[in-house]
């Protein structure tokens, strides 16, 4: 548990950020590729659909 809290409060290094970005981009490419794209399904709580993210200006754009 201490490791989780410690990890949540430390700032990642530039190398760690680059690694995380690479992982995310690879995952996005797998989902968006035309030849045999990965299928993705998710079950979310309805409250997520009603949660406000950002201020009023961002809600207007949506």
Image (spheres, rainbow, N blue to C red):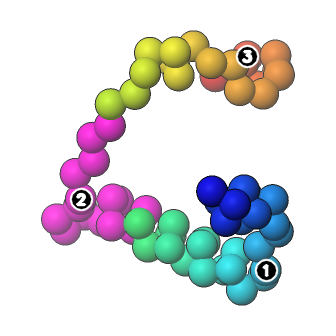
Give the CA distance from mark 1 to mark 2: 31 Å
The image position of residue 44, as x and y in percent, is: 40, 27
Q: Is residue 8 above or below residue 10?
A: above
- On whether residue 29 falls in the magenta region, the answer is yes
In the structure shown, which secondary structural element does the residue marked by tag 3 occupy? helix
The image position of residue 39, as x and y in percent, is: 22, 51
Viewport quadrant of the N terminus: bottom right
The answer to which quarter of the image holds residue 4 is: bottom right
Q: Is residue 16 above or below residue 62?
A: below
Q: Residues within 10 Å of mark 2 (few under 14, many from 20)?
A: few
Give the CA distance from mark 3 to mark 2: 32 Å
Closer to the camera: disc 3 or disc 2?
A: 2
Q: Which residue matches tag 1?
A: 13
Compared across the picture, whether 45 is left or right of 2 comes to left
The image position of residue 59, as x and y in percent, is: 72, 19
The answer to which quarter of the image holds residue 27 is: bottom left
Q: Which residues are magenta?
A: 28-42
In the structure shown, which secondary structural element does the residue marked by tag 1 occupy? loop
The image position of residue 30, as x and y in percent, is: 33, 67
Looking at the picture, tell me which residue is in the foreground, 5 or 20: 5
Q: Which residue matches tag 2?
A: 38
Q: Which residue matches tag 3?
A: 60
Nearest to N terminus: mark 3 or mark 2: 2
Closer to the camera: disc 1 or disc 3?
A: 1
Closer to the camera: disc 1 or disc 2?
A: 1
Residue at position x 53%, y 22% in the image: 48
Compared across the picture, whether 17 is left or right of 32 comes to right
Looking at the picture, tell me which residue is in the foreground, 57 or 10: 10
Nearest to N terminus: mark 1 or mark 3: 1
């Amino acid at each position: 548990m201490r490791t989780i809290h410690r990890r949540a409060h430390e700032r990642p290094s530039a190398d760690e950020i680059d690694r995380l970005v690479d992982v995310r981009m690879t995952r996005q490419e797998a989902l968006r590729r035309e030849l045999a794209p990965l299928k993705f399904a998710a079950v979310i709580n309805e409250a997520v659909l009603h949660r406000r993210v950002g201020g009023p200006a961002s809600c207007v754009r949506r």
